[in-house]
C-alpha cells in the first residue's frame, strides 16, 4: 500500500494551479472536466503519480469558496533550504505566514506558507 493523493477543494482552479506550479514548482500532471457533475479535477506533483504522492485540486463549478474548518491541519513539503524556499515563494507572490526558523520546543527548521484558498503548507528541511 502507499498514499496516492491528498484532495483540496478550491474556489478558482486556474489561480490555484498557478500557485502550485509557479510558486511551489509542482507540475500539472492531468486535468479533467466532469460536466455531468459540474466539477473539474487537477492533479499536481513533483513527479509521476506512479512514483509520488500527488495533490488533487477539486473545483466544483458552482462554489467560489469554502469554510476551511478547524480539523484541517496542513500539507508538508520537503525542501533543501527553507530560508531560500521562502524567499523564492515571496518573490513569486506567495504568502509566508510563519517565517523560517526552528520549530518551537525543537530544532527542526520549518516555515508555513498559505495558498490562495487559505490552506497552510509546511516547508521542512530535508
Image (cartoon, helix red, strand yellow):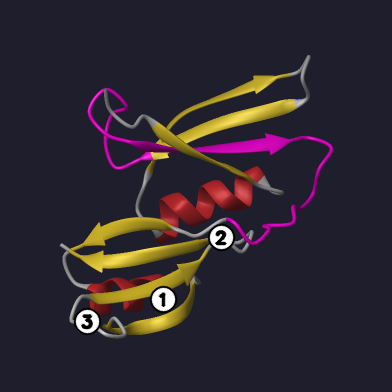
What residue sits right under mark 1 in the picture? 91
Residue at x-position 52% and y-position 52%? 18
Residue at x-position 33% and y-position 79%? 87
Task: Indicate which disc, 1 or 2, sits on the residue closer to the N terminus.
Answer: 1
Is the N terminus in the top left, top right, bottom left or bottom right quadrant?
top left
Q: Quadrant of residue 48?
A: top left
SS at circle 2:
loop
Q: Position of residue 25 (x, y in %)?
A: 35, 53
Please report the bounds of the magenta region as a residue range: 45-71
Q: Position of residue 120 (x, y in %)?
A: 50, 64
What kind of secondary structure does the magenta stretch mostly adopt? loop
For the residue carrying disc 1, how many other residues have a C-alpha within 10 Å: few (<14), some (14-19), or many (20+)? Answer: few
What residue sits right under mark 3 in the picture? 106
Residue 46 among magenta residues: yes
| Distance in Å between CA atoms under marks 3 and 2 | 24 Å
What residue sits right under mark 2 in the picture? 119
The residue sitting at the right extreme is 62
Q: Position of residue 86 (x, y in %)?
A: 34, 75
Q: Position of residue 14 (x, y in %)?
A: 62, 45
Amino acid at each position: 500500500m502507499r498514499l496516492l493523493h491528498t484532495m483540496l477543494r478550491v474556489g478558482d482552479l486556474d489561480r490555484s494551479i498557478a500557485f502550485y506550479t509557479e510558486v511551489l514548482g509542482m507540475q500539472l500532471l492531468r486535468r479533467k472536466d466532469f460536466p455531468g457533475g459540474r466539477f473539474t479535477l487537477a492533479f499536481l506533483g513533483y513527479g509521476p503519480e506512479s512514483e509520488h504522492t500527488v495533490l488533487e485540486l477539486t473545483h466544483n463549478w458552482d462554489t467560489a469558496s469554502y469554510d476551511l474548518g478547524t480539523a484541517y491541519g496542513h500539507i508538508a513539503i520537503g525542501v533543501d533550504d527553507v530560508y531560500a524556499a521562502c524567499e523564492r515563494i515571496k518573490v513569486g507572490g506567495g504568502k509566508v505566514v510563519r517565517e523560517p526558523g526552528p520549530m518551537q520546543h525543537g530544532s527542526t527548521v520549518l516555515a508555513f506558507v498559505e495558498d490562495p484558498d487559505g490552506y497552510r503548507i509546511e516547508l521542512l528541511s530535508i
